Image (cartoon, rainbow, N blue to C red):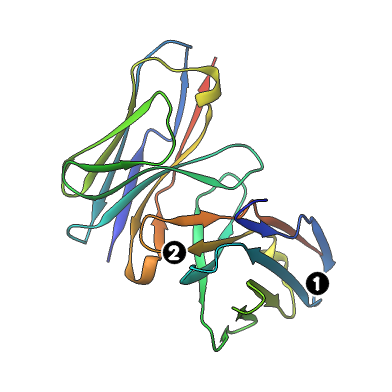
Amino acid sequence: SQTIHQWPATLVQPVGSPLSLECTVEGTSNPNLYWYRQAAGRGLQLLFYSVGIGQISSEVPQNLSASRPQDRQFILSSKKLLLSDSGFYLCAWGGARETQYFGPGTRLLVL
Amino acid sequence: RKEVEQDPGPFNVPEGATVAFNCTYSNSASQSFFWYRQDCRKEPKLLMSVYSSGNEDGRFTAQLNRASQYISLLIRDSKLSDSATYLCVVSRRAGKSTFGDGTTLTVKP
């Protein structure tokens, strides 16, 4: 069966510091991968979408970037965090018929 | 206008009640529809896909009305464990899914 991992679970970072969040998927090959952000009490905002190694689509212009160095690895990065980057970051892989399955998420607090 | 809109909630119901949530979408090119459940401070989990013919999974029934561009979720015989936020998701294609802001349900004893 497929499993998706994210780490860390919680992160507190100062404004201006860099960020690297990692997501890995097991049990499937060449999955579509997604990064979302959820603000408190709100729905999910799609940040990045990838159909394969090195293929990234950005949905929202911001100071975040994503990379897919391996088939089942998806990384979310920032060179300098802003206060507005705080939120719940979720990685997902795409199953059949656009279903999506989420990892446990990372709660990021930028101070 | 948001692409996907849900009942604002919150819904507070007693155990055993029947509760219904609606979700409207604006893009007529939408192809796939889903309901997700999200517990507090957890990731969303797929509850059920929504098909044109309607579909049922135990106490849960989902329906799609393409003409009026809305989907619904009906929960019968509510349990305490049904307390969660329910997210409506509409997808045009892979990579083009839009999530609603969610409707919070609290089932009370």
Q: Quadrant of the C terminus of chain B?
A: bottom right
Q: Is residue B26 left or right of residue A19?
A: right
Tag 2, which secondary structure?
Answer: loop
Where's residue B71, x and y in %? 63, 73
Secondary structure category for the residue under label 1: loop
Can you say whether A76 is above or below A55 in the image? Answer: above
Mark 1 vs 2: CB contact within 8 A? no
For the question of whether residue B109 can be seen, the reply is: no
The residue at the point 33 percent across, 65 percent down is A95
Circle 1: residue type: Glu
A93 up-or-down from A14: above or below: below
**Residue corresponding to mark 2:** B92
Residue that mark 1 sits on: B15
- Residue A81 drawn at (x, y percent): 44, 17
- Give residue B24's position: percent from left, percent from top: 66, 65
- Label 1 vs label 2: CA separation? 36 Å
